Every structure is written in C-alpha cells, then in structure tokens.
C-alpha cells in the first residue's frame, strides 16, 4: 500500500511538472497517461496551436522516454515510418535501417494526410508492437504509445481513417480552446524570450512498470463489470433499452475493444485517485472518449444534426447499474 501511495504521488508530480511547461492540458495528460499505463493509443482531434506536440514532448521528458514526431504527408511511404533494408557497398551486404517508429512515445501528426499503406503500417505497429523489415521481425520499445492527431479544419488532400482502423485507438480525445485565464498565461510565458524551462524527470521505467502492476490489481465489482457490458450493448441494440429514438440513428454500435478499453481506463482512473477499487464515477466520464469514435451513425443522424456525444449521454442516463 505504501508503494502504491508513493507511485500515486509521483503521478501527481507528473501533472505538476507538465503544468510548468504546458498550460491547461491536464485532461489531455490524464488520457495520455491512461493510454501509456494500460497499453492503449490515443487519437486527438483539435484545431492547430493547442500545444498537442508540446504536451507529448514534455511528457516524454518527464517520464524519461524516447520521443519521435512524425509529420504525415501524402508522399510518405511505409519505409519512412518503419525502416528499410539498405545496401552497404563496403561489406556488400544489406543492412537494416530502423525507422522513427522505434521510439516509446510517437506523435503521428495529421495521420489522415498519409495514404492508406502508411496508415496501415502505423496501425499494425500499434496492434502488434512489432514491425517486419525484410525477412526479420523486430519488437518495438516498451512502453509504446502512439498519439495521432487529426486536423478538423482542412479536409482537402486527406485520407480519412477507416472506421475499422479508428477502432484500434483506445480513446479519441477532443482538444478544445483554453479558457481566458489559461490563454493569458500562455501569452505571458511565450512572449517572455528568456523563458526556457527544462522539465525534470519524475517517473522511471521501473515506476511505469510498477504502476501498470498496480493498475492491474485494482478491483472492479461484478456489478460494475455488468454495467460496462450493458453500456456496450446499449450502443448496439438501443431499442432493447427503450432508446427507440436513438435506435433510428445508430448504424453500428461499439466493438468488443470498447469494453476492454473502458474496463482498463476505469481501473487506471481509480489508481490515479488513490483507490484499489473502481467506482461508477470512474466509468461514466470515460465513456465519451472510449465510445465516441466507435459508434457509427447513419445518414438520418447527420441530417437531423444528431451527434455520437448526444447518443452516449442518453445511454448513460438510461442504462442503470444493477443492484443500485
């Protein structure tokens, strides 16, 4: 128990250290840490200039992890991502040149600008935690987290991720503008030409492994396990839960990956809060990020201006926890 308390204090220290560099992105940092500690990946959507790159770069420094930023473009090739075989004229042999995917924190910037082959190479690496170059298979570094971004402003020259591939991301997080006070603090910092704070390392690789083990030991009751299943099935069969109006708009509900992601994220949230058990309040706020990119709505929903967020809110209000 004392060890867990020490780790939980260090997690708070991660937030505090990131805050010294990045203003107002605690929500994003929380989701990134959940993904990192539970083996998931995060898809971000937000307008440019909201410190998405700076946030994950700072987090890498605070966690003492390797970081690579990949700017996705239409002319990118899979070899530019995973690496390739090159010919060594001196030795007369082919040698492996590993690509930037061989790092621990990967920022895949504007992933929807890359063609399908590159997206598939990234998503295969995310799922398998390994890549194949030539005839050899290489394991990726652990821990391994991909934070991919999509720019909602420009759609020209983009290749939207297929729904089946978007499902591989644990959560999709929408990054919004800061409030007035936070934006004022950003301006004050960034206009101070002498400001150059270097983040300090807070967690070691051993700490990250211990946190994963601690999260794995968090208890979740049968009642809440059933609640997660009911939420999942309510997205697939809304009419069975009295959601007749919503049933007219939902084309496909969430996949089994959603239940797994929600389960793990709830346990991580409980651990962050210093508990070894999950509460309903750990599950509900995560549903939007876990389910939002997995529910596929039909054309009627688009015509009527219905969003997945509205569907999820209605499901959370309707589906009850058995025994409460």
Image (spheres, grey):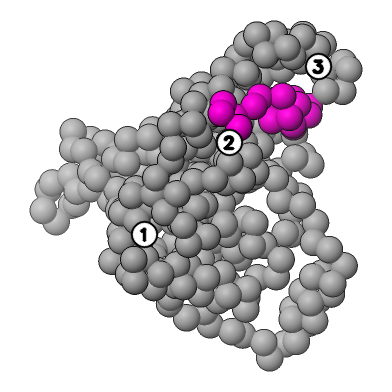
Ranked by sequence position, the earlier of labels 2 and 3 is 2
- Residue 136 on the magenta segment: no
**Can you tell which of label 3 and label 1 is closer to the viewer?**
1
Q: Give the range drawn in magenta.
A: 307-324
The tag earlier along the polypeptide, 1 or 2, is: 1
As drawn, is 225 to the left or to the right of 179? left
Q: Can residue 286 be seen here?
A: no
Is there any visible trace of residue 275 in the rendered image? Answer: yes
The quarter of the picture where the C terminus appears is top right
* 243, above or below 312, in the image: above
Of residues 241 and 53, which is closer to you in this image? Answer: 241
What label sits on residue 211 in the rendered view?
1
Q: Badge 3 local density, few (<14 within 10 Å), some, or many (20+)?
A: some
Q: Is mark 1 on a helix, strand or loop?
A: helix
| Disc 3 element | helix
Residue 290: image tag: 2
Percent position of residue 238, x then y: 68, 13
Q: Is the magenta stretch mostly helix, strand or loop?
A: helix
214 shown above or below 290: below
Q: Nearer the viewer, residue 275 or 294?
A: 275
- Res. 301 mark: 3
In the image: residue 221, left or right of residue 321: left
* Helix, strand or loop at mark 2: helix
Does the residue at mark 3 contact the one at mark 1 (Cβ under 8 Å)? no
The residue that appears at 59% across and 63% down in the rendered structure is 55
Callout 2 environment at 10 Å: few (<14), some (14 to 19), or many (20+)?
many
Q: Is residue 25 above or below residue 304?
A: below
Residue 316 or residue 96, whichever sits in front: 316
Q: Which residue is drawn at 69% across and 8% down?
A: 239
Residue 152 appears at what percent x and percent y? 75, 40
């Amino acid at each position: 128990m004392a060890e867990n308390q020490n780790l939980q204090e260090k997690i708070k220290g991660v937030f505090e250290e990131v805050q010294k560099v990045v203003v107002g992105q605690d929500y994003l940092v929380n989701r990134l840490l959940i993904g990192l500690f539970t083996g998931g990946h995060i898809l971000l959507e937000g307008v440019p200039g909201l410190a998405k790159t700076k946030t994950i770069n700072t987090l890498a420094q605070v966690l003492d992890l390797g970081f690579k930023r990949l700017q996705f473009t239409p002319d990118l090739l899979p070899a530019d991502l995973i690496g390739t075989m090159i010919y060594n004229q001196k030795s007369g042999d082919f040698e492996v040149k590993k690509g930037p995917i061989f790092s621990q924190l990967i920022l895949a910037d504007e992933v929807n600008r890359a063609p399908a082959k590159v997206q598939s190479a990234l998503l295969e690496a995310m799922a398998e935690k390994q890549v194949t170059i030539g005839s050899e298979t290489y394991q990726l570094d652990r821990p391994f987290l991909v934070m991919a971004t999509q720019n909602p402003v420009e759609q020209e020259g983009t290749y939207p991720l297929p729904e089946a591939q978007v499902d591989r991301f644990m959560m999709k997080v929408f990054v919004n503008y800061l409030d007035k006070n936070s934006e004022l603090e950003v301006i004050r910092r960034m206009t101070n030409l002498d400001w150059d704070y270097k983040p300090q390392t807070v967690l070691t690789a051993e700490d990250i492994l211990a946190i994963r083990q601690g999260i794995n030991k968090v208890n979740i009751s049968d009642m809440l396990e059933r609640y997660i299943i009911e939420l999942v099935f309510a997205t697939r069969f809304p009419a069975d839960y009295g959601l007749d109006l919503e049933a007219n708009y939902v084309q496909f509900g969430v996949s089994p990956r959603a239940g797994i992601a929600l389960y793990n994220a709830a346990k991580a949230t409980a651990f962050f809060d210093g508990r070894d058990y999950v509460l309903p309040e750990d599950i509900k706020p995560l549903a939007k990020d876990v389910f939002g990119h997995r529910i596929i709505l039909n054309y009627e929903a688009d015509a009527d201006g219905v969003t997945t967020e509205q569907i999820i809110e209605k499901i959370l209000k309707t589906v009850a926890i058995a025994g409460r």
